[in-house]
Amino acid sequence: MAENIFKHLKESGEKSEPPEAGSAAAAEGAVPPLELQKARDVIGALTKAIKTSRLYPESNPIYQKFIEELSEKFNSYIEEHGNLKLRLTQFKLIYKGVEVYDNPDKLENIALKLFADGVREITFHEGMEDIEILNFLDVLNTNLDPEKTDDDMVTLLWEKNFQHITYFVIEETGEGETKTEASSHRMPVQEFVKAQEMDTAQKKHLEKESGMPVTEEKAKGPVPEMPVFSVYTLTEEEIELLKKEKEAEENPSFTFKIIDILNEILYMERDFKAFSDIVETLEKALDLLISNADIVRASRLLKNLREISEAKGKFSDEEVMKINRAIDRAGDEIRIKEFGAMLGKNQTIDLNAISSYLSLLHKNSIAYLLELLEINNLNIRKHICDVMAEVVKDDIDIIGRKVNDKRWYIVRNIVYILGRLGKAKGIEYLKRTLKYDEPRVRLESIKSLMKISGDQAKDLLLTVISDNNSEVRIQAVKGLASLDHKKAVQPLIEFISHEGFKKFEFAEKKEFFEALGKLGSNEVVPFLKNIYTKRPWFSRSAYEELRMCAVYGLSKTGTNDALSVLQGLKEKPGSKIESVRLRAITEIKNSMGSPSSHS
């Protein structure tokens, strides 16, 4: 049942020639907007009812809902504007010169089916009953499926013996001779008499359209039943060509109209088998939208499914379970791989659309979303990481278990997510990543620990100051200073005092001393003064760097004791260390807010 709808998801056909812009605009301007909208509402309700009637029997409440809507639209129009007359072209329905219907899908186009069998005008009259609406839908549905009948459209209409629906037909009368006449024998005489006569403009239009003279006759008595032969028919070759065309092309607009209808039906359907069929169809539609890189519409479809799964009390447990399984499948390994392949080909997709879609998935998608982090686009990767953080929430183990992955770039992104989550539980996994071979992973781990903060994170940072990579050591020391971890003072003093420290680059030594001064305050002033005043017996250049670093450290303490030490020291005027000492004095005075008080 729902499979019939899914067949439409890849269908489209060639577009008909547009009317001249000037004449179309003039016609539309001549029809009052509210009247035109009511006419369009009728056609819209008609197309919905056709699709729904092909899915459900007459006893189904969903079917009845759409029929009631169609009846209401007809009645609303007729009560206000009288009979509804529509002219037909090959692909369109025209209301008072204005196009109100055009479906590029030739096999589903209502106008084409009527036009091909000779119908050029159809009128819905006052007094039309619901049974006639049902019969009219039955005719259209029968004719839309050529396997159900060999009869043409006019014959099917005539067999229904409509009392309030009239139509004009171009007919063959024998041996190739043709004429156009009112199909008076297709309705009761008393009703045909009520039908409006064609005016001159209508006749000229029909003559131009058919290439034949138009005559209009009123029936004076019963007319024997006889088949009507269409002037325009589709050969088997043409039908086959249309099928190939529709399979080769797509019509996104029509596709999403179908999806909208199915979503509406889900809220009304209470037969679980039918409900399941529709959900499965929507799953296939979701796959189609992803393959077409239509992430905006895919997000909307997935959001509708999430809303149903979270609508407490409106759906049975069985229905909710069906919906949740569909969402799970949207985030399974196969579909995430397809999503990744699509992103690889379409890296200019709106990043917000990507985030919106991925954030609607369930947690089962996380393990597979990690694979998307191989995409060679930094912005896309960052958005995926941010979405994963939102999806994971407190369930850190889902991604934490992946920190042993051999791909360092995957692990670095996992570390970023752990920091984004800011949960203390993530520290257990960061202990491992701080030992990862790739320095970039360790650097990211330090950033994440800084975001998590807390004593446990601070203590873990202390273990990194002895890392074998200079960038990692510097980042760790900066982190300790930023988090104001006072417990780091003594370990920093011990590390600086180690003989190997003298071999570090000046920039790194400076970072260590500044961190020590900031964290230690007056406590470290004696240690820094001792380094400054110590006179080495050898390797004078290394000790000069240490003395200069001690000045930087004293400046970061911001205390009177440090200021006194600096003011008491004298260096050769113009020397580099003297310049650093004077700047340090000024920095401390400024930090105290009274530069003139320490001259």
Image (spheres, helix red, strand yellow):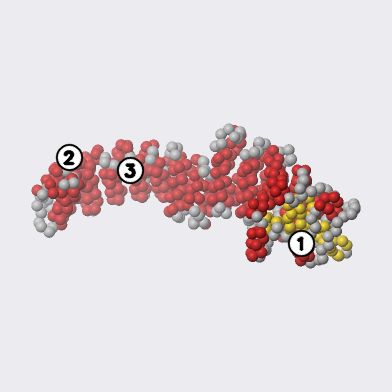
Give the mark nearer the N terminus: 2 vs 1: 1
Discs 2, 1 touching: Cβ within 8 Å? no
On the rendered structure, is 349 left or right of 168? left
Category of crowding for the residue at label 2, using alpha-carbon neighbours closer than 10 angstroms: few (below 14), some (14–19), many (at least 20): some
Labels 1, 3: front one: 1
Mark 2: amino acid: Glu
The earlier-in-sequence mark between 3 and 2 is 3
Please name the amino acid that badge 1 sits on.
Gln
Residue to which mark 1 is pinned: 202
Residue at position x 73%, y 41% from top?
57
Name which of mark 1 and mark 3 comes first in the sequence. Answer: 1
| Residue 450 tag number | 3
Q: Residue at x 57, y 46 (%)?
A: 301
User: What kind of element bears circle 1?
Assistant: helix
The residue indicated by pointer 2 is: 523
Q: Quadrant of residue 332?
A: top right
Q: Nearer the viewer, residue 510 or 224?
A: 224
| Left or right: 550 in relation to 329 | left
Q: Is residue 345 above or below residue 61?
A: below
